[in-house]
Structure formats: structure tokens, C-alpha cells
Image: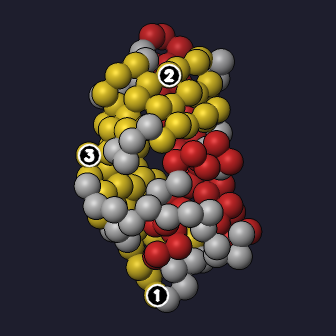
Amino acid sequence: MSHVEEFIEVNVDIHTAYNQWTQFEDFPQFMEGVERIEQRTATLTHWKTKIAGIEREFDAEITEQVPDERVAWTTVKGDAKQAGVVTFHRLDDHRTTVTLQLDYDPEGIAETIGDKLGFIKRQSLGDLTRFKQFIENRGGQETGAWRGQV
């Protein structure tokens, strides 16, 4: 199992950052390689990805969700094996740190080599950077929110 931990500071308040992160179907707009996400239930999402030519489909279950604090998940079915958590830390009224921690199991030689070369780490930081651009370019207006707790 491999581990990635990355963070980024976004220039929006913690509520806005968290609210946007709960809009899973918008992830393809800032996550490279994510082709589609379907929110099937309040806690179940279905993902279709294509990263470096490798296609994956899997279901991820939200295992913990605390508004303005964290969203944790684990895969429960499909091609990918991963678990992670995104946490939100208020810096002030207009700035938030978003931290991603991801544990994943690379499969096959290509994914193992990519893992050793830091591909997933760079991809994760790139996705966080695009999230920052996405939310800040919207003028700090999230596309929606889900404030439920799991």
C-alpha cells in the first residue's frame, strides 16, 4: 500500500471549500483523469477514471463526513483499491488549507513504476491546484453543498 499526503491553501472560507468538495459529480472539472462520477446515494459514488491510459471503474463509500472538517472514503467494489480523507483547516475568514491523504494499492508493473516515480503524488498536487483555481475562479461561489454528517 502506498501513501500520498498533499495540501494547498485556497483563498475562500472553509464553508465554501468544504461545500464544493462535497459536489463529487463536479470533480471531472478539476481532477485530471476522472471522466465521470455518479452520486448513487448519500454515501456511495461510482467513479470512471482513465489515467495514463489505464481505465478503472469503482465504487467508493463515504465512511465519515463532518461538515467543514473532513470527508473520508474507501473503495468497496471495482478495479481500484484506495482509501483517503480530505480535511479542511480554517486559516482566517477568507483562507482555508485543504489536505488530502490517500492510501492506494498500485496494480501491475506500469502502476508500480508510476508509483515509484511519484506519479500519484504529482497527480494529487495537480488536482488540488486545479481545485484551488476552480473555486477561486468562481469568485468563491460553490456549485452546491451537502451538509449532512456520516
Query: Residue most toward the top?
Result: 108
**Among all residues in the image, which is located at the extreme bottom?**
93
Q: Residue at x 35, y 22 (%)?
A: 77
Instruction: Please tell me which residue lies in front, 5 or 118.
Output: 5
Residue 107 percent across, percent down from the top left: 42, 15
Q: Does dot 1 land on a helix, a strand or a loop?
A: strand
Residue 54 locus on image (x, y percent): 59, 17
Q: Amino acid at mark 3?
A: Thr
Residue placed at 60% from the left, 68% from the top?
142
- In this picture the colour scheme is secondary structure
Is residue 73 placed above or below 87 in the rendered structure?
Answer: above
The residue labelled by disc 2 is: 57
Going by the numbered disc 1, the residue's amino acid type is Asp
Q: Position of residue 7 (x, y in %)?
A: 47, 60
Q: Secondary structure at mark 3?
A: strand
Q: Quadrant of the N terminus?
A: top left
Q: Nearer the viewer, residue 65 or 148?
A: 148
Residue contact between numbered discs 3 and 1, judged by CB atoms under 8 Å:
no
Q: Is residue 37 left or right of residue 103?
A: right
What x and y, as percent, mark residue 43? 34, 44
What residue is shown with label 1?
92
First in residue order: circle 3 vs circle 1: 3
Answer whether labels 1 and 2 touch (C-beta < 8 Å).
Answer: no
Q: Residues within 10 Å of mark 1 (few under 14, many from 20)?
A: few
57 lies left or right of 72:
right
Q: Look at mark 3 in the image and give the residue it sits on.
A: 63
